[in-house]
Amino acid sequence: MFLAIDDTDSRKGMCTTFLITELLREFEGLNLMDYPRLVRLNPNVPWKTRGNGAVVIRLGDGVEKKDLVGFDGKEIFSYTGESVDMDDALERALKVVEKWSETSEDGTNPGLIVSNEKAPYKMYQEAVKDVVELVDTIAALEKLDCRYTGLGNRRGLIGALAAMAWIPNDHTYELITYREQKRWGTVRKLNGMIRFDRETERTFDSYDHDEKQQAVAPRSPCPVLYGVRGDDHRELMDALDIIEGEPIDRWLLFKTNQATDEHIQYSTADEVKPWTSVHIKGTVTSRPNTITGGHVFFDIDDKLTAAAYEPTKGFRDLVKKLIPGDKLELWGGIREEPLTLNIEKMKVVELSEKEEKVANPQCPDCKKRMSSIGKNAGFRCRKCGTRAEEDDIETKLVERELEEGYYEVPVCARRHLSKPLKRIHSG
């Protein structure tokens, strides 16, 4: 039996992953089949709360103990086994969702699904890459052997169904620890993140060494103490010994689609759609321009504006070194108004030659250097009046301050789904 939930949190608190720990308490007589799953969906949808993540667990009568996946006063294991009654499960799960969801906040609309069969994979693909309508989700649910319900406008059913439909062709893990309830909303006290980042080989996005800040603990008053991500679930458990601070109330290990780039779809600069994430190839056609606030913009193929916003910090300095003629590949989300690509990763495929002005044009008759008439107006010889164009200046080639290759935004600005270069280069 699959049990999937989404949209129980708000910007002020709660975390949908925390509800999984409460559901495991509610269904203590049943066993967890395989790892709990944390599935991130389209990061561009305007009504998301924080990380746009849905969760799903599979429960049953366990037969064979498999892996240690959590701790909540006692060790939590995953098993193999058979499914259980859906009607009873829906009623019990709904009580948990109603108790813990942030339904008093606008925009929190939980969805809950209990199903004896897996949803079609296309429901995940659509929800991670595009915008899905609730009516389409309901139509898909009606074709499944399942029970479902929701609160508010029930939009959480979209994410819940998508999470249940996910197939982990590529996947990572996240170990999430939770705080004692009396500490919720207080400042988190942690240390050891730098050591954890340096002593583990297959983890990522734990510490931003450029900005000198941790990236494992949220800043919201939610129940999460910290979460560490990586490709090796055994390595993640080292965090329980290395990262120190306040007591851990409970922890759980999730299988996730984070850091997979599964939200990305290939497009061209003139075909991008708002609220999607794309991979495009093109040529820089304008010099980077920095506006108030520190955001940097440039054009691709004279068809699409690409942006490195202020939160990307030092990445903007790399973008500023681009010049017209540079050939790029870009990955990022599409903002609706104005239509802009918010860069997540960049590959400099080919650098254009950069010329630097050496001198004004020389008059062919007087052999004297001409004077500028005005900005972009050309040149004129003061002695005989002979004129020259802007392109007639003498130049020399200069070495570029940028190299061909991959570049990415810093850890502090990275989206959950964006595949870090560390994973790309490691295969």
Image (cartoon, rainbow, N blue to C red):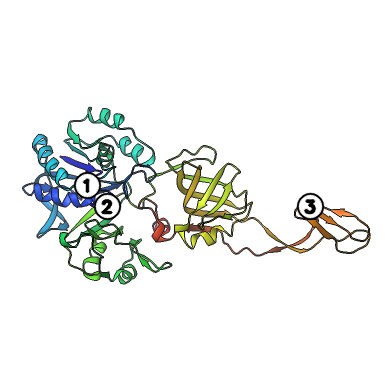
Give whichever of 189, 270 is nearer the camera. 189
How busy is the neighbourhood of tag 3: few (under 14 within 10 Å), some, or many (20 plus)? few
**Where does residue 68 sit, x and y in percent of width and height?**
16, 57
Q: Residue at x 78, y 55 (%)?
A: 374
Residue labelled with disc 1 = 102
Residue labelled with disc 3 = 377
- Disc 2 marks a residue whose amino acid type is Lys
The mark nearer the N terminus, 2 or 1, is 2
Quadrant holding the N terminus:
top left
**Where does residue 106 sit, x and y in percent of width and height?**
28, 43
Relative horizontal placement of residue 405, taking residue 362 as reference (left or right): left
- Disc 1 marks a residue whose amino acid type is Glu
The mark nearer the N terminus, 3 or 1, is 1
Q: Secondary structure at mark 3?
A: loop
Relative horizontal placement of residue 89, taking residue 198 as reference (left or right): left
In the displayed structure, 136 sits above or below 279; it is above
Residue 12: mark = 2
Q: Secondary structure at mark 1?
A: loop
Spatial CA distance of label 2 from label 1 is 9 Å
Relative horizontal placement of residue 210, taking residue 31 as reference (left or right): right
How busy is the neighbourhood of tag 2: few (under 14 within 10 Å), some, or many (20 plus)? some
**Where does residue 368 sit, x and y in percent of width and height?**
89, 64
| 2 and 1 marks in contact (CB < 8 Å) | yes
Relative horizontal placement of residue 40, taking residue 34 as reference (left or right): right
The mark nearer the N terminus, 3 or 2, is 2
- Disc 3 marks a residue whose amino acid type is Ala
Q: Secondary structure at mark 2?
A: loop
